[in-house]
């Protein structure tokens, strides 16, 4: 396998940050991964796994071997009359996998259409959109232990999924290489999730009265294309911050001053605040300094207009975090992984 020295990873992260990696290699099979694990151990160089690079901000030189996971393949591992269990290799493109499922009439991940990145990273932050998270359809995953090379199967409980969270971002960080993910999808009696206002409105605008797997996917694609920047045209990593979950008392305090604040019930006397609303209301939408900015159509998305350095984007994020804290008393947590 070819291992490049001093390679730019600009083409491999959707922010388009031009950071240098000490070494870079593409793994296309389990054997490639094991070979790279051995190489990094023998040469005493740490390993960094990269999928589609759509949830990461590089703020410094990467003194590691970057393993681009490109192991591909999709197979049905079990099925009955109601459901199908589909295993997808980590290097499969997420949206192409969603399209594959829709083509086969398997329901469950249509709301997650057009999310960039690869299947292998989908459990990392339990990707979610429009009322669906992968934990809803997750069956298990196989991961390779970075130290021993052994493969372990994790079920949903063991992944400790939360809101944009999993054990792989927390306690088990940097211990595993996710190798494949198996999803349980429905073949009939589909339970569509169309309660998000934007989906209802878009299906309405499309003239759809009886939603289907494909029409929901099309509605999601239309909405996303209308408001989210395409990373191929404008560098970004999607929502930069998580929606904060706070005590209802704090929401009421905020509402006294800002009656239009957007919040949703989040159980146990808590509410989820729309971080995008907080940032927009604080005047950041469309802000630009140098090549780092806040997207003009969606304040939750930070963008790179071309030559921004990772640090410039991170500084902007830190300023927004401080401003939101002082304006509303709310701590914004970063969703995008910082390197
Ligand atoms: P990467 O950015 O390559 O990696 C992310 C992290 O996972 C890194 O820490 C990396 O080391 C680790 N990692 C990657 N692959 C593996 C592996 N095989 N094994 C172990 N560790 C690994 N996210 C949502 O949840 N919902 C959305 O609706 C959404 N919309 C987005 C829209 C846009 C326009 C963009 C740019 C991003 C969006 N995202 C969204 C964020 C992102 O697409 C997802 O989090 C996606 O799952 C990241 O996949 P990736 O392969 O690009 O991960
Ligand atoms: P939106 O429709 O403008 O809504 C703003 C926020 O309100 C969303 O983040 C969503 O929270 C919440 N929300 C809206 N309707 C809700 C409902 N009926 N019940 C509970 N919460 C509701 O959001 P948007 O920014 O355009 O994004 C649309 C969807 O795509 C969201 O689910 C969002 O998470 C997802 N998305 C994620 C990323 C990313 O990088 N993570 C990027 C783009 C879009 P939730 O975020 O908790 O769903």
Image (tube, rainbow, N blue to C red):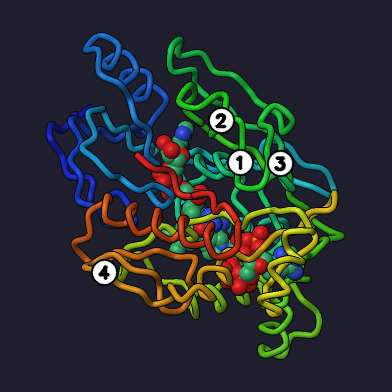
Q: CA distance from mark 4 to mark 1?
A: 31 Å
Q: CA distance from mark 3 to mark 4?
A: 48 Å
| Label 4 CB less than 8 angstroms from ligand 1 | no
Q: Which element type, helix, strand or loop, lies under badge 2?
A: loop
Mark 2 and 4 residues: CB-CB less than 8 Å, in contact?
no
Q: Is residue 175 left or right of residue 141?
A: left
Mark 1 and 2 residues: CB-CB less than 8 Å, in contact?
yes
The tag earlier along the polypeptide, 1 or 2, is: 1
Mark 4 and 1 residues: CB-CB less than 8 Å, in contact?
no
Q: CA distance from mark 1 to mark 3?
A: 23 Å
Q: Which element type, helix, strand or loop, lies under badge 3?
A: strand
- The residue lying at 37 percent from left, 39 percent from top is 50
Q: Quadrant of the N terminus?
A: top left
Residue denoted by label 1? 165
Q: Of the residues tagged 3 and 4, which is closer to the observer? A: 4
Q: How many numbered callouts?
A: 4
- The residue lying at 31 percent from left, 13 percent from top is 38
């Amino acid at each position: 396998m070819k291992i490049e020295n001093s390679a730019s990873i600009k083409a491999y992260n959707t922010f388009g940050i031009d950071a240098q990696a000490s070494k870079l290699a593409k793994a296309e099979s389990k054997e490639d991964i094991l070979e790279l694990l051995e190489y990094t151990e023998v040469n005493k160089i740490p390993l960094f796994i990269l999928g589609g690079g759509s949830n990461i901000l590089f703020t410094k030189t990467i003194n590691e071997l970057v393993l681009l996971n490109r192991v591909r393949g999709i197979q049905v591992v079990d099925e009955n009359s109601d459901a199908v269990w589909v295993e997808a290799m980590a290097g499969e493109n997420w949206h192409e996998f969603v399209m594959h499922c829709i083509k086969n009439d398997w329901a469950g991940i249509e709301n997650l259409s057009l999310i960039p990145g690869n299947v292998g990273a989908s459990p990392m932050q339990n990707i979610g959109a429009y009322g669906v998270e992968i934990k809803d359809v997750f069956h298990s995953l196989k991961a390779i232990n970075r130290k021993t090379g052994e493969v372990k199967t994790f079920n949903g409980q063991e992944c400790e999924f939360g809101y944009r969270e999993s054990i792989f971002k927390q306690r088990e960080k940097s211990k595993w290489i996710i190798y494949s993910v198996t999803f349980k999808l429905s073949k009939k009696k589909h339970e569509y999730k169309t309660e998000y206002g934007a989906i209802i409105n878009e299906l309405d605008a499309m003239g759809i009265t009886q939603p289907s797997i494909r029409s929901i996917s099309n509605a999601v694609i239309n909405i996303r294309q209308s408001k989210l920047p395409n990373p191929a045209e404008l560098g970004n990593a999607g929502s930069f911050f998580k929606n904060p979950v706070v005590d209802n008392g704090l929401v009421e305090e905020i509402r006294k001053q800002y009656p239009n604040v957007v919040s949703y019930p989040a159980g146990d006397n808590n509410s989820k605040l729309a971080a995008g609303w907080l940032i927009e209301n604080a005047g950041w939408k469309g802000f630009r300094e140098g090549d780092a900015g806040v997207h003009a159509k969606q304040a939750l998305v930070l963008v790179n207009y071309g030559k921004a350095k990772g640090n410039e984007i991170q500084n902007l994020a830190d300023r927004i975090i401080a401003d939101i804290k002082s304006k509303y008393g709310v701590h914004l947590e970063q969703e995008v992984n910082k390197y």
